[in-house]
């Protein structure tokens, strides 16, 4: 039963850790930034492609307009040559009619290209707005991420310091200091007592030496007087 209970607690703690990891605001912000950057890359690619299509439609429109003008000029030349007698009138009219049909066909293509260009440019403008919005959002999230990281650093340091302060045993520390004071005082008293004993030993030795020195001097004086008496020098 105890084993099952311990296994349950371990699984529960791991689940809580997983939830905490998922709810970590920094991790979530970093993941959000990665997603936004991917969206930005896709939007930039789409914007480039739509702009390319708008440019292509514009070029095609200009090409169709140029062709339409060219066919119109050819129709004019055919009719002018027929008027001068250089070309059969019926043939000139037929060819001029074909040229005008080509002109109309190219003008229709030019109109359609212009419409396509307009539509592509509108889409490009919308995509450009989306790109700018994504850039602003990414910049905002990056600033928020910096703030979150700074706040986490401060909170972690503060938590660590507060935890250490909360775990300090002030009464135990004071008792330890008192015991150290008592021990130091005892060591100091013992050192002083040894000093006194040493001084007492030196004093006794000095007294003995002094007493012996006095006896030697007295004996010397006695010996001198005896020598004088022997030599007949005594007063």
Image (cartoon, rainbow, N blue to C red):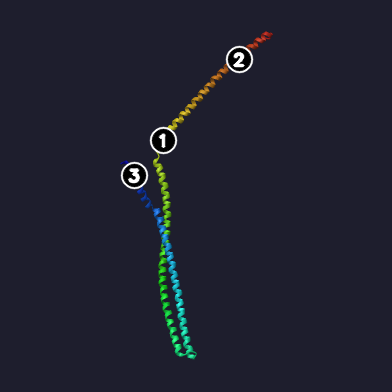
Q: In the current view of this chain or complex, which residue is farthest to the bottom? A: 85
Assign the C terminus to one quadrant of the image. Answer: top right
Label 2 secondary element: helix
Residue 170 visible in the current orientation: yes
Label count reads 3
Element type at marker 3? helix
- Residue drawn 42% across and 58% down? 34
Circles 3, 2 touching at the beta carbon (< 8 Å): no
Label 1, on which residue?
Answer: 174
Residue sitting at x 33%, y 42%: 3
Vertical placement of 92 versus 119: above or below?
below
Q: Position of residue 18 (x, y in %)?
A: 37, 50
Q: Which of 58 and 186 lies nearest the eye of the viewer?
A: 58
Crowding at mark 2 (Cα within 10 Å: few <14, some 14-19, many 20+): few
Select label 3 or label 1 by which is in front: 3
Residue under label 2: 216
The disc, 3 or 2, on the residue closer to the chain's N-terminal end is: 3
- Residue at horizontal 45%, vertical 69%? 52
**Front label number (1 vs 2):** 1
Q: Quadrant of residue 127?
A: bottom left
Q: Would residue 235 be seen by someone viewing this image from the given angle?
A: no
Distance Cα–Cα, label 3 vs label 2: 97 Å
Relative height, residue 82 to residue 161 (above, below): below
Mark 3 Cα shell of 10 Å, populated few (<14), some (14-19), many (≥20): few
Query: Judging from the image, what secondary structure is the residue with disc 1 in?
Result: helix
Nearer the N terminus, badge 3 or badge 1?
3
State the residue position of label 3.
7
Q: Nearer the viewer, residue 206 or 156?
A: 156
Tell me the tag on residue 202. Answer: none
Q: Nearer the viewer, residue 174 or 20?
A: 20
């Amino acid at each position: 039963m105890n084993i099952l209970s311990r296994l349950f607690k371990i699984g529960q703690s791991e689940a809580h850790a997983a939830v905490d990891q998922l709810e970590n605001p920094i991790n979530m912000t970093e993941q959000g930034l990665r997603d936004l950057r991917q969206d930005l890359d896709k939007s930039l690619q789409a914007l480039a492609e739509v702009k390319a299509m708008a440019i292509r439609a514009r070029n095609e429109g200009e090409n169709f307009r140029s062709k339409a003008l060219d066919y119109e000029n050819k129709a004019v030349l055919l009719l002018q040559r027929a008027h001068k007698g250089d070309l059969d009138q019926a043939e000139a009219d037929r060819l001029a009619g074909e040229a005008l049909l080509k002109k109309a066909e190219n003008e229709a293509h030019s109109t359609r290209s212009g419409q396509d260009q307009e539509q592509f440019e509108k889409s490009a403008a919308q995509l450009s707005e989306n790109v700018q919005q994504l850039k602003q959002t990414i910049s905002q999230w990056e600033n928020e991420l910096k703030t979150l990281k700074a706040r986490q650093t401060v909170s972690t340091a503060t938590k660590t310091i507060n935890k250490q302060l909360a775990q300090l045993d002030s009464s135990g520390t004071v008792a330890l200091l008192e015991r150290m004071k008592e021990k130091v005082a005892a060591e100091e008293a013992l050192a002083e007592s040894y000093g006194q004993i040493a001084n007492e030993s030196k004093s006794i030795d000095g007294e003995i030496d002094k007493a012996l020195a006095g006896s030697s001097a007295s004996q010397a004086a006695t010996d001198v007087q005896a020598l004088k008496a022997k030599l007949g020098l005594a007063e």
